[in-house]
Image (cartoon, rainbow, N blue to C red):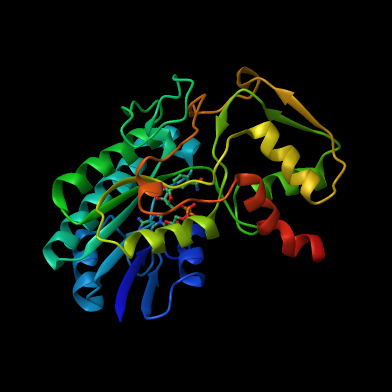
Amino acid sequence: MVRVLITGGHGQLGRALVRTAPAHTEVIALGAAECDVTDPFTVRAVLARVEPTLVIHCAAWTDVDGCERHPERAWRVNALGTQHIAAACAAAEAALVALSTNYVFDGEQDEPYHEFARPHPLSVYGASKLAAEEVVRALCPRHYIVRTAMLYDAHGRNFVTTVLRLAREQPRLRMVADQYGSPTFVDDLAKAIWQLVAQPAYGTYHLVNAGRASWYEWAVAVLETLGLGVPVEPIPASQFRRAARPPRNGVLTSLAAPALGIVLPDWRDALTRCLAPLRSA
Ligand SMILES: NC(=O)c1ccc[n+]([C@@H]2O[C@H](COP(=O)([O-])OP(=O)(O)OC[C@H]3O[C@@H](n4cnc5c(N)ncnc54)[C@H](OP(=O)(O)O)[C@@H]3O)[C@@H](O)[C@H]2O)c1
């Protein structure tokens, strides 16, 4: 029996990891109230009590614009919190999966970013997550750094549920059409993470659904999948003011995951599966 501790266990990826966990895996998913990663004493005490063989570190402050407005909180949760987790994993001889993001890249290149592309974050969120990657590499030898992007589920707070809410509230939507990324269904990511940790192939991995979409294309696909006839107007990013600057090209691709036989489905296929329960509801 493998015992796995999940931090940020009540977030959207944490919940997906719980519902997709393989047999013979005992999962302990803790939220911020039970394991505040900014407190090193709590982190060490939790690892000593749970005795995990693997920690999947999902806890983060994921509000990208909030991070830009309150950088100290972003650094404390995302970078320092990960430092505490990495140090405790090394001391307890537990392996570590640390979640990271496409926001570590500046988006200036035209091709998708693979694992060996040079990071250059434009935002506080991206910089704090890149610093988290660096402490994991420095402190915890048995680590998997998993960069992903644009996570969504049919429930909770994410872009897909925001589009559905706006479609109920507004006669037409306006969506940015000149920023691209890799929309990724949390269930597909969770299954890929379970596949990854079955192998002691430590290193950095990009795990996203295949293909690329702008926010505009993604919103149109959500509405079309559910047969909602709300018009969507494509707009440039310059007309949508945000505190943080997302990468123009945030599309990820992987050299490392396919080498292990891990290939995620296309994002449109994933979106159809994710929204299927809402179609029949
Ligand atoms: N969402 C995306 O599009 C996306 C894209 C790329 C990478 N990622 C990365 O993937 C991981 C999982 O993301 P997600 O979408 O599942 O995020 P999420 O739904 O926002 O979940 C993150 C969880 O972390 C918890 N948390 C916040 N501060 C904490 C603290 N000090 N101690 C312990 N827990 C704390 C939050 O709890 P509360 O809600 O109680 O504060 C929340 O449940 C994160 O590392 C994120 O950076 C996400």
The relative height of residue 154 versus residue 45 in the rendered view (above or below) is above
At horizontal 58% and vertical 26% (from top left) the residue drawn is 179
In which quadrant of the rendered view does residue 237 lie? top right
Of 141 and 158, nearer the camera is 141
Q: Examine the rendering and report whether any part of residue 137 can be seen.
A: yes
The mark tally for this picture is 0
Q: Position of residue 75 (x, y in %)?
A: 31, 41
Image coords of residue 90 (percent x, y): 14, 60
Instruction: Decide if residue 49 is on the left or right side of residue 36.
Output: left
Residue drawn 51% across the image and 64% down it: 16
Q: Looking at the picture, does residue 5 appear above or below residue 135? A: below
Residue 140 horizontal side relative to residue 189, left or right:
left
User: Which quadrant is home to the C terminus?
Assistant: bottom right
Q: Nearer the viewer, residue 271 or 32?
A: 271
Q: Is 139 displayed left or right of 177 in the figure?
A: left
Q: Residue 34 vs residue 138: left or right?
A: right
Q: Is residue 72 visible?
A: no
Residue 195 at x, y = what percent?
40, 62
Where residue 34 sits, quadrant-wise, is bottom left
Residue at 37% from the left image edge and 81% from the top image edge: 24
User: Quarter of the image containing the N terminus?
Assistant: bottom left
Q: Where does residue 8 sit, x and y in percent of width and height?
A: 40, 61
